[in-house]
Image: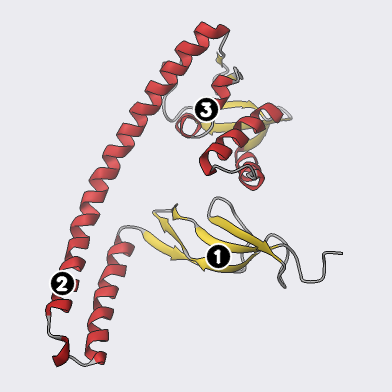
Amino acid sequence: MTITKFNVNDYIRFETNENTRDCVRRFYRDLHNRQDVEDDVNWFMNTHTKIIDGKPVMRIQFHEFASTFGYYMIMGSLPLIKDNDIYFETEGDDSKARLLAEFENFRRRTEKEKADLVITANNKLLGQLTEVYDDFDRAFERPLWGTSAVEFAQGIKQIFTKFKKIMSDNGVAQFDPMGEPFDPAMHEALIRHPADLPEGTVASTVQKGYMANGKVLQHAKVVVSSGKVGNDA
């Protein structure tokens, strides 16, 4: 079976084992360019693992598989199973080479479709942001010596309020995870430090994060508690 038999929204599944875990680990190491990715790996495995016929099995839509660790699975010749139990395997170097070529074409095609959608959405947002740009232009064109500090601050605040509304209308929301359990899907840990909070809790927020239509736009940069002070013994 070839990749062309899979639709973007098809679910595929494969055994949850150390080989699968290693593929996910390699993906995150290349993505973040660092070795310590176990928090990311654990989150991904736990999120996508289901119990089917009494066995732990990863179940994931093909488009997410293709955009994450699919390349590593194919390179490792690991078998995949479509939900209708049709097997998808690679046998021999020639088969793997053809499959990798198909996989790359599939990935490029889906990435182009996503890019076209992003460009359309970006153009709409940029058109709205030009209004904010014009507001700043007008604010700084006025002679400052004829404007009090209070009046100037009020004008800037009005522009900021308009900017926040544009962000909100486009589904962008700010979040502060202070005091919440660390989640690598939403937070970027800058450092672990003893704090008067349970281990694995966000102790402080260095930079707030942003969501866009329910998806992470910008990870929050955080300090994570390594446990309460004095509990190292």
Judging depth in this view, the residue of 10 and 80 nearest the camera is: 80
Residue visible at 59% across and 17% down in the picture = 77
Instruction: Indicate which label's residue lies in the foreground, 3 or 2.
Output: 2
Q: Which residue is mark 1?
A: 177
Q: Quadrant of the C terminus?
A: bottom right
- Indicate the position of residue 49 as horizontal and vertical percent values: 64, 36
**Are circles 1 and 2 on residues that touch, CB within 8 Å?**
no
* Kind of residue at disc 2: Asp
Q: Which secondary structure, mark 1? A: loop
Q: Which secondary structure, mark 3? A: helix
Q: Is residue 111 visible?
A: yes
Instruction: Indicate which label's residue lies in the foreground, 1 or 2.
Output: 2
Residue visible at 53% across and 44% down in the picture = 32
Q: Which residue is mark 3?
A: 70
* Kind of residue at disc 3: Gly
Q: Quadrant of residue 199?
A: bottom right
Residue visible at 28% across and 41% down in the picture = 117
Q: Earlier in the sequence, mark 3 or mark 2?
A: 3
* Kind of residue at disc 1: Pro
Q: Which residue is mark 2?
A: 137
- Indicate the position of residue 212 as horizontal and vertical percent values: 39, 55
Q: Crowding at label 1, few (<14), some or many (≥20) Cα neighbours within 10 Å? A: many
**Are circles 3 and 1 on residues that touch, CB within 8 Å?**
no
Q: Residue furthest right?
A: 233
What is the C-alpha distance between the residues marked 3 and 1?
A: 31 Å
Judging depth in this view, the residue of 211 and 24 nearest the camera is: 24
